[in-house]
Structures are given as C-alpha cells and as structure tokens.
Image (cartoon, grey):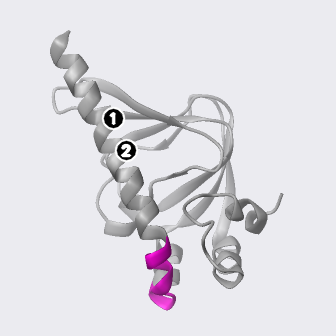
Amino acid sequence: MNAYEFLQEVPLFSRLSHKHLNGLAKACTQRTYKEGDILVHQGNPGVGLFIITSGRVKIVKTSEEGERFEIAEHGPSEVIGELSVLDGAARTADVVAVEDTTCLVLASWAFNSFMQSHPEVALEILPVIVKRFRETNEALMSQHAQHQRS
C-alpha cells in the first residue's frame, strides 16, 4: 500500500480531499524502528509527526519525580506527535517501539507549510485532534486516581 492509500485509512486524515491527501502523502518519508527503539524523547522539540503503518508503540511519560507512567499503546493507522508539531512545544512523553514498527514521518516544517497553504484542512483535522486530546486526558486522570489509591 502506498502512502496515499494508507493515509486514506488514517482517522486524522480520512476526511481530506484527494488533492490534500496526495499533497501530504508526497511529503511523507518512511522510517523503520526495531523493538525498543525510541522514536520520540520527552522534552525534545517536535520535528515531525509519525503515522504508524505497522507495529506498535507505547507512550511513556516521566514525572518530575522520575516516575514513569505508560499512558497508552498505539498501532497501525494511528498518529503520534501531532501536538508538538502543531504548537511547537517540546514532546510531552517518550514514544518507544514495543515491536518492530514502520511509520510514515511528516516533518513539522512540511506539515506546517501544508497547513498554511491549505488552512481549510485544519477544520477537517481539528475535531480528531481534540477528541484524541480528551481521551489522553481521561487516561491520565484514571491512572492518577489508580496511583493515589495504591
């Protein structure tokens, strides 16, 4: 499956037009990671977003006290790193491959340039990003409550 066909299956991008999907697909590069590789380091700048085509990754957050919390796992058709790309802030967690993983990588500058050229795309992807943010927030609150009870 080529990048264009794969992006059609990704919830973040599935509502985009053929023209927009094609433009994003051309800007992607493919990268492969071995089990245990760190794709993203907490605190580093967000240099791109990752679209998982195969494999699985886990999201691990380290608290200021040094405690590590596994927040979530993600697999094919899921996007990671989109918040840092959108707001330019540092990565909020580590992303670690839990098995051999292949991703389409969309560099921050390419994604932001695309969004500036096609601002209407933001209206299509914003609801998906907000939903994902809410889910992550709920997962963190649930883990915090469990931790408080232990």
**Which residue appears at 33% of the width and 35% of the height?**
139
Q: Is residue 46 visible?
A: no
Q: Is residue 106 visible?
A: yes
Q: Is residue 141 magenta?
A: no
Rendered position, 32 above or below 87 = above
Identify the magenta region.
Answer: 116-124
Which amino acid, mark 2? Glu
Residue 91 drawn at (x, y percent):
34, 51
Q: How many marks?
A: 2
Q: Quadrant of the C terminus?
A: top left
129 vs 14, left or right, is left
Residue 23 drawn at (x, y percent):
66, 80
Quarter of the view holding residue 100: top right
**Which residue appears at 63% of the width and 74% of the height?**
24
Residue 17 drawn at (x, y percent):
65, 80
* Residue position marked by numbered label 1 in the rendering: 139
How far is mark 2 from mark 1, CA to CA?
A: 6 Å
Tags 2 and 1 in contact by the CB under 8 Å rule? yes
Q: Quadrant of the N terminus?
A: bottom right
Q: Residues within 10 Å of mark 1 (few under 14, many from 20)?
A: some
Which amino acid, mark 1? Ala
**Which residue appears at 42% of the width and 65% of the height?**
127
121 vs 85, left or right, is right
Rendered position, 60 above or below 7 = above
Quarter of the view holding residue 143: top left
Q: Which of the labelled discs sits on residue 135, or is there none?
A: 2
Q: Secondary structure at mark 1?
A: helix
Quarter of the view holding residue 34: top right
Residue sitting at the far top: 150
**Which residue appears at 70% of the width and 57% of the height?**
30
